[in-house]
Amino acid sequence: MKKLLLLCGLAVLAGCAGQGQGGIGLSILETQPYMRDERWVPRTFVQVQKAVLLQQTKCGSNIQFAVDEDHPSYARVTQKLDSLPGQDDGGWSRTLVLGLQMMTSLRLRGNLYSYYEIDKAQIQAMYNAILHPDICPGQPIPPEPPKPAENEEE
């Protein structure tokens, strides 16, 4: 009986180890169980690409932008999560993926995916990289000036 339990335990561990070698694929990552946030992004692909390039240049960020070759109305902004010393980069399982779908009226629908649970600060940092590219991660975002009221009487 002990041998049977030991063999079952080893089989389970072998299955877990096998998954770690190949890692999770992008087609699995970009599914509902791994979606961490969804919101509208008031940008175009060109504006997002410029923002990513500015973040890379100004802040040394490891953020990337690519339009999907098979679906030109879909693009991804990706950022590797920090690996621990001695750990490999983990492939897609250690990457934040912001999938952007081009919609009408020059807006993008953004879905943020991550294999691991991430906190609100990490989610906001990903959006800040494209919405406030001139501000490096960790720096405060200045408050927006108040908008004038539409029905304001003079």
Image (cartoon, rainbow, N blue to C red):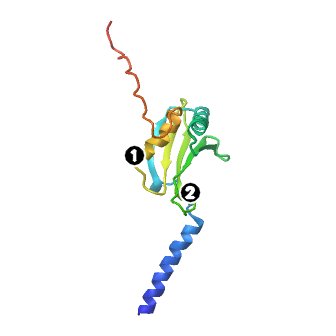
Name the foreground residue: 96 vs 133: 133
Q: Which residue is mark 1?
A: 120
Q: Amino acid at mark 2?
A: Trp
Q: Residue at x 49, y 45 (%)?
A: 111
Which residue is farthest top? 154
Considering the numbered disc 1 on the image, is that residue within a helix, a strand or a loop? helix
Coordinates of residue 11 in the picture (x, y in percent): 50, 81
Q: Nearer the viewer, residue 102 or 4?
A: 4
Image coordinates for residue 119, horizontal then vertical, percent:
40, 49
Disc 2 versus disc 1: distance between alpha carbons?
20 Å
Q: Position of residue 85 (x, y in %)?
A: 53, 60
Closer to the camera, 86 or 110?
Answer: 86
Give SS at disc 2: helix
**CB atoms of marks 2 and 1 within 8 Å:** no
Q: Residues within 10 Å of mark 1 (few under 14, many from 20)?
A: few
Image position of 87 with respect to 102: above or below: below
- Label 2: how many residues lie within 10 Å, few (<14), some (14-19) or many (20+)? many
Res. 92 mark:
2
Residue located at (51% from left, 72% from top):
16
Q: Earlier in the sequence, mark 2 or mark 1?
A: 2
**Quarter of the figure that contains the C terminus:** top left
